[in-house]
């Protein structure tokens, strides 16, 4: 198991939330764990000290965290188009690693949050990369094969994940921003999930899962209400499609966790299909066989989707 350090500073919580989504993405990659850490505030009054342990949120980072981890995701609120001082202060304490080349060759991604749409996200992200480049880290951005990069109307840049918090910092992190945080985590976990070849497989598996899930719902309804109901005029068994509607939103949005539990849920419908294909006659038996086929396609495409989204090189 290798660790990726998700290191952030957050004054009002936006970057802290982003860090959680980045960490979630990291943990989607098989064999990789996220180590989430923060840095204490700095004060212009030199005597002021922070407690050893923060009152809430992630523990404070130690230099050893940076040394032990296989990669770094660094998050900061934008401060006049640059990273916040507490993070810079921490980075300024890493010169021994620079001398030894401790971080050279390790992957690194950056993420930020601003108040306003054009408040300097790219400038912040680019300037956050500079010290990491001095350390010889390999900077990982976000490729346009992540579909949310095209569809977002708030944060999300090819330089790294971002969020527009609003002038009162109360805008929730949008679905696209969350997905891009997660994609950044997956990328830093050294995954090939977003390379064009793997992206093609992922998209195919996604559409196959959506199509088969919708087909199973349609089959369940038409079978039990019109084509071959257990009782003439329609049977209550039509309600069996209700559990299939539960994973539908998550499957449509491409949520890996939903794919994982839906692939287990579908086994109940596979079993029903097998039992009814053997025990019933005529059209009902044929529909049961069709149900078996659809559940198998859904199962296989879900596994492919999860694998393509989380595979490690
Ligand atoms: C000193 C200071 C400078 C800031 N500079 C910018 C800026 O240049 N552009 C911007 O859009 N927001 C700026 N902000 C707003 C924060 O970047 C924004 O509220 C961010 O979402 C806060 O993240 P947090 O909730 O993790 O602390 C600034 C805030 C402070 C306190």
Image (cartoon, rainbow, N blue to C red):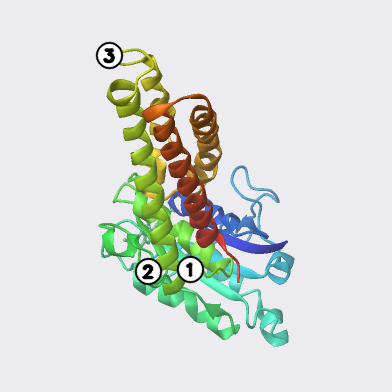
Whether the residue under disc 2 has CB within 8 Å of ligand 1: no
Q: Earlier in the sequence, mark 1 or mark 2?
A: 1
* Of marks 1 and 2, the one in the foreground: 2
* Of marks 2 and 3, the one in the foreground: 3
Label 3 crowd (10 A; few <14 / some 14-19 / many >=20): few
Residue at left offset 55%, top offset 32%? 271
Percent of width and height locating residue 263: 52, 42
Q: Earlier in the sequence, mark 1 or mark 3?
A: 1
Residue 110, numbered circle: 1
Whether the residue under disc 3 has CB within 8 Å of ligand 1: no
Q: Earlier in the sequence, mark 2 or mark 3?
A: 2
Residue at left offset 66%, top offset 51%? 59
Percent of width and height locating residue 111: 45, 64
Q: From where the camera sits, is residue 10 visible?
A: no
Q: Quadrant of the N terminus?
A: bottom right
Q: Nearer the viewer, residue 3 or 65?
A: 3
Secondary structure, mark 3, is: loop
Q: Is residue 6 left or right of residue 305?
A: right
Residue 233, numbered circle: 3
| Distance Cα–Cα, label 1 vs label 3 | 60 Å
Q: Are marks 1 and 2 in contact (CB under 8 Å)?
A: no
Secondary structure, mark 2, is: loop
Q: Nearer the viewer, residue 48 or 219?
A: 219
Q: Quadrant of the C terminus?
A: bottom right
Secondary structure, mark 1, is: strand
Q: Is residue 39 left or right of residue 202?
A: right
Residue at left offset 45%, top offset 44%? 293
Label 2 crowd (10 A; few <14 / some 14-19 / many >=20): some
* Residue 31 placement: quadrant: bottom right
* Residue at the disc numbered 2: 145
Percent of width and height locating residue 231: 35, 12
Q: Is residue 216 left or right of residue 264?
A: left
């Amino acid at each position: 198991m290798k660790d990726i350090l998700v290191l952030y500073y957050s004054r009002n919580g936006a970057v802290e939330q982003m860090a959680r989504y980045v960490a979630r993405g990291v943990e989607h990659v098989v064999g990789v764990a996220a180590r989430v850490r923060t840095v204490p505030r700095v004060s212009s009054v030199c005597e002021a000290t922070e407690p050893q342990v923060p009152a809430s949120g992630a523990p404070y980072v130690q230099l050893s965290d940076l040394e032990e981890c296989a990669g770094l995701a660094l998050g900061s609120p934008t401060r006049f188009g640059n990273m916040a001082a507490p993070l810079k202060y921490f980075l300024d304490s890493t010169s021994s690693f620079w001398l030894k080349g401790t971080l050279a060759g390790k992957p690194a991604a950056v993420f930020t949050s601003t108040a306003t749409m054009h408040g300097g996200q790219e400038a912040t992200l680019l300037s956050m990369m500079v010290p990491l480049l001095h350390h010889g880290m390999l900077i990982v951005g976000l490729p346009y094969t992540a579909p949310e990069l095209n569809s977002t109307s708030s944060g999300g840049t090819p330089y790294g994940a971002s969020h527009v918090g609003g002038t009162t910092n109360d805008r929730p992190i949008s679905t696209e921003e969350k997905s891009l945080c997660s994609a950044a985590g997956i990328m830093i976990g050294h995954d090939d999930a977003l390379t064009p070849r793997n992206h093609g497989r992922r998209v195919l598996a996604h559409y196959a899962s959506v199509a088969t899930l919708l087909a199973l719902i349609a089959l369940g309804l038409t079978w039990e209400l019109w084509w071959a109901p257990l009782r003439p005029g329609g049977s209550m068994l039509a309600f069996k499609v209700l559990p299939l509607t539960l994973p539908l939103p998550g499957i449509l949005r491409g949520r890996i966790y939903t794919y994982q539990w839906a692939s287990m849920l579908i086994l109940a419908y596979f079993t029903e299909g097998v039992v009814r294909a053997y025990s019933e006659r005529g059209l009902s038996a044929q529909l049961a066989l069709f149900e078996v086929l659809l559940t198998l396609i859904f199962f296989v495409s879900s596994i492919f989707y999860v694998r393509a989204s989380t595979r490690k090189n």
